[in-house]
Every structure is written in structure tokens, then in C-alpha cells.
Amino acid sequence: MLKKKVEDICNRQIEREGYSSNLYLAMASWAETKGLSGVAQWLYAQAEEEKLHMLKFIKYINERGGKAVISSFKKPPETYKSVEDMFKEVLKHEQFVTSSINEIVDLALAEKDFNTHNFLQWFVTEQDEEEASAQAIIDKLSIGGKNNLYQFDRDIMSLRAKPGVTAATE
Ligand code: FEO
């Protein structure tokens, strides 16, 4: 049975993963309207992964005798100054999610909830990959990708560490 404190912080994470999914959907939609179909594809795949992260928390809470709560999500921004700015926001957001996961790890250890600690290890690795992936894209843009968006857009899917939707089915 999950302790209430752990249940609450896991429910907070449902909201954060759900918002992440919506944030990337909004970014994908923006990129699509700019004719950047590769960037949009990358972001749609990312949105799908975030939805599956949310589902992992929902199922975990319920399986451990808690009650998963789906809250409303705040509206993500609609526009960005540039593709580079947008990916800087992606990295900033993933760093925020990493610190959020780390807070749950901290609490799980403090509460001696080793099941939750074990459950979270997948997310610890995933966050590492997601930050690295966003950083790799920013690096590509800064070494010239932003001056050749056509090529960057064509190649961006090759920068994914793994195929989009499969990761979260693990
Ligand atoms: Fe599920 Fe990218 O945080």
C-alpha cells in the first residue's frame, strides 16, 4: 500500500507528464504550421512518449492500492521565436522533470518505499536520455543547423536515441 505522501507526489507527476505531452503536442503543431514536418514528427513522437510516462504513473499508483488522479493541465505556449528557442525550452522542461523525478526518489528513500524507488529507476535513465537528446539537437542547431533548417528538418529524426513510441511500452 502506497503511503499518502508518496501517492500525492506520484499524482503530481501524472500532471507533469501529462503537461509534458501537451507541451510537445503544441510545439509539434507550431512546427507543422511552419512547414517543419521533421521537427513536428520528432515532437509528436515525444508527446506520445510523455503520454505513456503519465500512464506508467497512473497504473503504478493504482496497482499499489492508491488512487490515480487526472487533473486539468495548463495551456502550453502557442508560439516560439525560433526552432532553436523552442528546443532550449524542451531542454529546460526536461531538466525540470528530472528534478521532479529526483524529488520522488528522495521521498521514496526517506519513506523506505523501495518498490517506488525501484519503479523510478526507469524514469531516472529515461530523463538522462531525454536531456541528452534535447542537448544534441541544440548542439546541431548551434553548429549551423539553424542556417539550414531544410536539412536540419530532414535529418532530425535520426537524432532520436530510440524509436518514438516504442520506448514507453517497455
Ligand atoms: Fe516524461 Fe520527458 O519527461
Image (cartoon, rainbow, N blue to C red):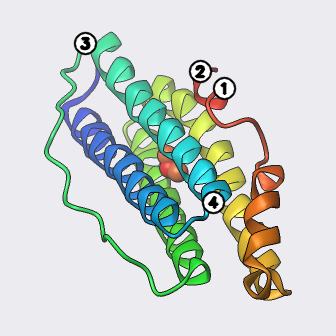
Residue 1 figure quarter:
top left
Mark with earlier residue (3, 2) = 3
Q: Residue at x 58, y 42 (%)?
A: 45
Q: Residue at x 22, y 26 (%)?
A: 68
Query: Is residue 30 or residue 165 the one in the foreground?
Result: 30
Mark 3 vs mark 2: give the one in front. 2
Mark with earlier residue (1, 4) = 4
Q: Which mark is residue 169?
A: 2
Query: Is residue 25 or residue 71 the one in the foreground?
Result: 25
Query: Is residue 15 or residue 12 the one in the foreground?
Result: 15
At mark 2, the secondary structure is helix
Instruction: Say what amino acid the circle numbered 4 marks.
Output: Val
Q: Which residue is mark 4?
A: 39
In the rendered image, the vertical position of residue 59 relative to residue 140, given as above or below: above
Q: Which residue is mark 1?
A: 166
Q: Which mark is residue 65?
A: 3
Q: Where does residue 72 sit, x and y in percent of width and height?
A: 14, 46
Instruction: Say what amino acid the circle numbered 2 marks.
Output: Thr
Q: Residues within 10 Å of mark 3 (few under 14, many from 20)?
A: few
Mark with earlier residue (3, 1) = 3
At mark 1, the secondary structure is loop
Q: CA distance from mark 1 to mark 4?
A: 19 Å
